[in-house]
Amino acid sequence: MPTKIKLYYFVIILNIVLVIILFNTNKKILAKNNADPTNNINYNTEEKPVKKFNINIVNWGYEPSEINVKKGDHVILNIKNISENDHTFTLDKFGFSTVLLQPSENKTIDFYPDQTGSFMFYCAVYCGDGHNSMNGEIIVTN
């Protein structure tokens, strides 16, 4: 058998072996990601319930000041500052922190609560005499 033909068959066999190795490696990586509860990849394609809330920022508070959701819900907060001062909506959980809203400004925040409990939101900029009462809570249950 000529050397060129032997080399040709060797290259074909080598490519087949590499494809098999890569295919098996990819399957192992996918299996590991699906089995690892600490990864951030969501392989669950099931729709989560959407909970929408309209929150008005007033002097000196939030309306409503209490929001009840379930763990895993898709939470959408439509926040509007209807006061005459700058305020923030600050929540130290669920992947965001401070959102500054100027008078008449609207902002939308969405997140998926991943733990149960009571989580306070508050205004992080001094806005006047009633500043200390500018807080509320998101209550997350199972």
Image (cartoon, rainbow, N blue to C red):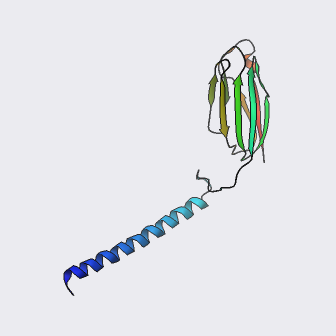
Examine the rendered structure and indicate whether residue 112 appears above or below residue 53. below
Left or right of 138 on screen, residue 94: left
Q: Position of residue 7 (x, y in %)?
A: 24, 78
Q: Identify which residue is drawn at 80% across, 32% down.
A: 66
Give me the residue at 73% from left, 45% from top.
73
Residue 47: tell me if it is visible: yes
- How many dots with numbers? 0
Q: Where, by quadrant of the figure, is residue 74 drawn?
A: top right
For image coordinates 70% across by 13% down, the residue present is 84
- x and y percentages locating residue 24 in the rendered image: 48, 70
- Where does the N terminus fall, quadrant-wise? bottom left
* The quarter of the displayed image where residue 75 is located: top right
Q: Nearer the viewer, residue 87 or 108?
A: 108
Residue 58 higher or lower than 113, as above or below: above
Percent across and percent down for residue 22 are 43, 67
Does residue 122 appear in the picture of this structure? no
Give residue 33's position: percent from left, percent from top: 56, 59
Q: Residue at x 38, y 70 (%)?
A: 18
5 w.r.t. 24: above or below:
below
Identity of the residue furthest to the top in this view: 129
Q: Is residue 28 above or below residue 17?
A: above
